[in-house]
Amino acid sequence: LVDVAVAHKKVLHIVRRAKQDLLDFSVGYEVMTEPVYYHRDGGFTKMHWMYRSRFDGWTVDKGLLRALIRNVFQAGDTVADFGAGAGRYCSWLNDTGLVTAHAYDGSASVTELSQGLVRFLPLQERHVLP
């Protein structure tokens, strides 16, 4: 016959051990997968920028852009996007031919990564606009 008390102790020991293993794994997993997306100045890291570009991580809210074209901007306006990332909003606006859009971002390598589409501008600093 099986001693129920002994079996119960063994099962509790196995469950506690498995629970601790899961906790240990989850702590290690969080540390391993906790990516650093931003530099101290607020710009994306080069790796995160490339990741977003590769896996279509740059979204464009076309509904917002259409509303801006209809209700805010006028034909011939010049507008700027600060914190532009890959510059997709400005590309869309420029493609309409209705406005001229300029893109700026605080990521130091943005000009290189965007192939010149987005210009670097340290956004944490004060700037005078023309």
Image: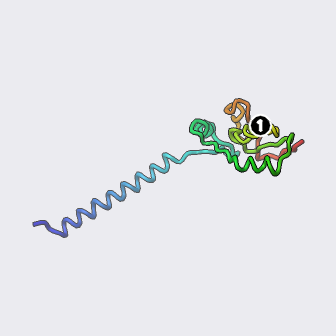
Q: Position of residue 76 (x, y in %)?
A: 87, 40
Say which residue appears at 17% left-offset and 69% top-offset. 4
Percent of width and height locating residue 15: 30, 61
Q: Residue furthest left?
A: 1
Give the tally of numbered discs. 1
In the picture provided, is 90 more to the left or to the right than 23? Answer: right
Percent position of residue 50, x then y: 60, 36
Residue 56, quarter of the rendered image = top right
Compared to residue 4, the image places residue 107 above or below, namely: above
Residue 17, position in %: x, y?
32, 58
Tell me the kind of residue under disc 1: Asn
Question: Looking at the rendering, in which quadrant would you find the C terminus?
Answer: top right
Residue 49 figure quarter: top right
Which residue in the protein does label 1 denote? 94
Relative to 127, is 84 on the left or the right?
A: left
Question: For this rendering, which residue is in front, 53 or 35?
Answer: 53
Q: Is residue 52 left or right of residue 105?
A: left
Residue lying farthest to the right in this orientation = 130
Seen at 73% across and 33% down, the residue is 117
Q: Secondary structure at mark 1?
A: helix
Residue 43 against residue 19 in the figure, above or below = above
Q: Residue furthest front?
A: 70
Q: Quadrant of the N terminus?
A: bottom left
